[in-house]
Image: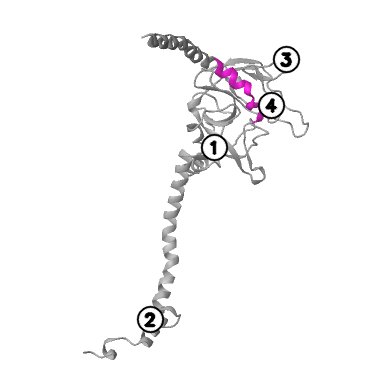
């Protein structure tokens, strides 16, 4: 048999080895750890480009499917939105609910509306690349996208003006004082519209207007175009729900209370619902007669 001294490592020897592995010093093992530590910064710089690419790809995926930032290039939505504001647009919301009156929406006006602001095109590839990146992340303007407030949805009758000079939707007047442009110097507020209009919004269309009515080139100005000034719902990119820049203007963009009046739903839904109601009422006598006939048997 082998003795304990021959076959086992003394406890003291094991303890010393363990201490050498965890204590800083001039030993060979510590030198190896130092070399590993020196290699870490180099490893980080090698991984940094990969991390940047991953971050950009994730941002672009989020932009494409969920939330996108937009730059406000004109004053057509003042005072709600100022020139230079950046807003976040929810691109998922309209997959879960319909577009509502009062929503502030961003839509693509390509081939349908002329741009409100003309932006000079980049002259070299580097500038074009910077513009593309800036537009993607909402730090540069895009002359093909518009931002307006939805006033009428499919089936609505929009009219201006009533006896009090108000815009009406399905005969219900809008109280727009909470969001119409007010001059910061004179405190004079825009009229709901300086020009009369009367339109019925077609299926799959929207009637949209800017909050700065005297400056906005909106549905009123495009009545001679196909659709009578309305825009297709399938051109809507999403709902602007918050201002994120500049920091002193961070705020949400809720639907104004005037669009929560019960009369809108009654007026817009009465016509489509009527045939269904009449159909249900018409089947009741038939069901009753069949039931009596069955009991007689």
Q: Is residue 242 left or right of residue 136?
A: right
Q: Main secondary structure of the magenta part?
A: helix
**Mark 3 highlights which residue?**
163
**Residue contact at pointers 1 and 3, CB within 8 angstroms:** no
Mark 3 surroundings: few (<14), some (14-19) or many (≥20) residues within 10 A: few
Front residue of 128 and 259: 259
**Residue contact at pointers 2 and 4, CB within 8 angstroms:** no
Alpha carbons under labels 4 and 1: distance apart: 23 Å
Alpha carbons under labels 3 and 2: distance apart: 94 Å
**Mark 1 highlights which residue?**
89
Q: Residue at x 64, y 46 (%)?
A: 247
Q: Is residue 277 above or below residue 130?
A: above
Residue 293 seen in render: yes
**Residue contact at pointers 4 and 1, CB within 8 angstroms:** no
**Mark 2 highlights which residue?**
28
Residue 176, numbered label: 4
């Amino acid at each position: 048999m082998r003795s304990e001294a021959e076959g086992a490592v003394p406890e003291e020897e094991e303890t010393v080895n363990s201490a050498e592995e965890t204590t800083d010093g001039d030993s060979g093992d510590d030198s190896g750890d130092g070399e590993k530590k020196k290699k870490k910064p180099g490893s980080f710089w090698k991984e940094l480009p990969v991390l940047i690419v991953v971050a950009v790809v994730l941002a672009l995926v989020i932009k494409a499917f969920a939330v996108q930032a937009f730059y406000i290039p004109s004053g057509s939505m003042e005072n709600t939105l100022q020139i230079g504001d950046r807003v976040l647009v929810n691109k998922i919301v309209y997959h879960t609910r319909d577009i509502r009156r009062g929503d502030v929406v961003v839509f693509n006006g390509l081939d349908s509306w002329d741009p409100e602001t003309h932006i000079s095109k980049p002259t070299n590839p580097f500038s074009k690349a910077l513009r593309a990146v800036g537009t993607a992340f909402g730090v540069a303007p895009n002359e093909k996208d518009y931002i307006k407030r939805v006033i009428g949805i499919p089936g609505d009758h929009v009219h201006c003006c009533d006896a009090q000079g108000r815009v009406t939707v399905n005969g219900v007047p809008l109280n727009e004082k909470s969001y119409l442009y007010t001059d910061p110097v004179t405190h004079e507020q825009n009229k709901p519209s300086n020009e009369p209009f009367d339109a019925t919004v077609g299926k799959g269309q929207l009637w949209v207007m800017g909050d700065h009515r005297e400056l906005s080139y909106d549905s009123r100005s495009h009545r001679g175009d196909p659709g009578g000034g309305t825009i297709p719902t399938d051109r809507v990119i999403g709902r602007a729900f918050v201002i994120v820049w500049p920091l002193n203007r961070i705020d949400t963009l809720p639907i104004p209370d005037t669009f929560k009046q019960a009369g809108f739903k009654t007026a817009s839904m009465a016509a489509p619902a009527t045939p269904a109601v009449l159909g249900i009422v018409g089947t009741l006598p038939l069901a009753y007669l069949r039931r009596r006939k069955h009991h007689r048997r």
